[in-house]
Amino acid sequence: MRRLVQSISARLSTKKPTQLDKNVIVFTTHKAASMLLHKLLADICQKNNITYYSPNQKADKQLPFDRIFNGEDFIAARTGCFGPVRFFVPSAALSNANIILHLRDPRDVLTSMFFSYCFMHPGEIEPNTGYRKEVAEAGIDKFVLDMSDENFSRYQGDYGIGSKYGRYVGNVYDRYTTYLREIVGKPNAVVISYEEMVLDFASWLRKFLAAFELADPDETYEFAMKRHAEAVKPAGEDIWSHKRRVIPGDHKEKLRPETISKLNLRFRQVLDALGYSDSQDETNQMFRIVSKF
């Protein structure tokens, strides 16, 4: 019996990966539930025997950003699913891949980054100590403005803010405008929102899975719903938890009105293009992007 199980396991482990008609590339930002995206992608790919490359994978399946930013087209040389990529990376594969761009209101991203940098994310020094404590004491309003302008590069460490590759991808404002220029509006790209993921995970998941063009998407949909639907449900706030607070609009409670006004002005193009402008109906903001592009 043991030999039979070992034989079956060996055959399963040597099963050839499913060849997608098109690569699937998933872009997002830091602080937009990117780790949930990784877990979801890992499950989708494992269930459908799709080769999966990710910053969160190990060894030969890890996306090598240092090499990519120095000219290697890692993605174009391979087939499968790639993501979640938390900033834009160039590749010749983008012209014919199925692209998912999962975005969150940049003001909420910046707000979440503060708690990640000061309290939540592991790194070279302990949370709420040293320069991390100094940033906390300086306050969230200074932090969010710095993260979206030239002061971004002055912050030490990479505690969920993406500073490790800052010289290639820029600050948070730069990352959003790059997405607008390089991906939003492209015929092979679907733009979906963190807000819809939180408020209507079932609808969001259908749109997410469509990019894979699976033979039996319903089976994978039911599987993913059972494994991940609970993870996106709002809960009480805990500044020490990786899942601190998922409710959209958190910046309105955490930032001063004058800070929000500055961010609104700075991100005006982004907010208008993605449906986050305060002048737009709030209900439409949550479900706006997919129907727009």
Image: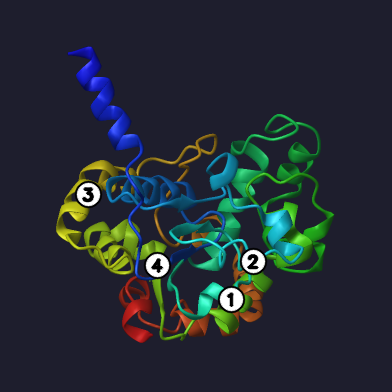
Badge 4 or badge 1: first in the primary sequence = 1
Asked which secondary structure carries label 2, the reply is: loop
Numbered badge on residue 73? 2
Badge 2 or badge 3: first in the primary sequence = 2
Closest to the observer: 194 or 278? Answer: 194
Q: Quadrant of residue 56?
A: top right
From the image, tell me which residue sits under label 4.
193
From the image, tell me which residue sits under label 3.
225
Viewer can see residue 124: yes
Q: Are marks 2 and 1 in contact (CB under 8 Å)?
A: yes
The kind of residue on which mark 4 rests is: Ser
Number of residues whose C-alpha sits closer than 10 Å to that of mark 3, classed few (under 14), some (14–19) or many (20 or more): some
**Residue 75 x, y percent position in the rendering:** 56, 63
Question: Viewer-nearest of labels 2 and 3?
Answer: 2
Viewer can see residue 234: no
Label 4 – label 3 distance at C-alpha: 17 Å
Label 2 – label 4 distance at C-alpha: 28 Å
The kind of residue on which mark 1 rests is: Ala
The kind of residue on which mark 3 rests is: Met
Badge 2 or badge 4: first in the primary sequence = 2
Number of residues whose C-alpha sits closer than 10 Å to that of mark 2, classed few (under 14), some (14–19) or many (20 or more): some
Q: Is residue 143 left or right of residue 192?
A: right
**Residue 255 x, y percent position in the rendering:** 59, 60
Residue found at x 29% / y 36%: 12
Q: Is residue 228 left or right of residue 171?
A: left
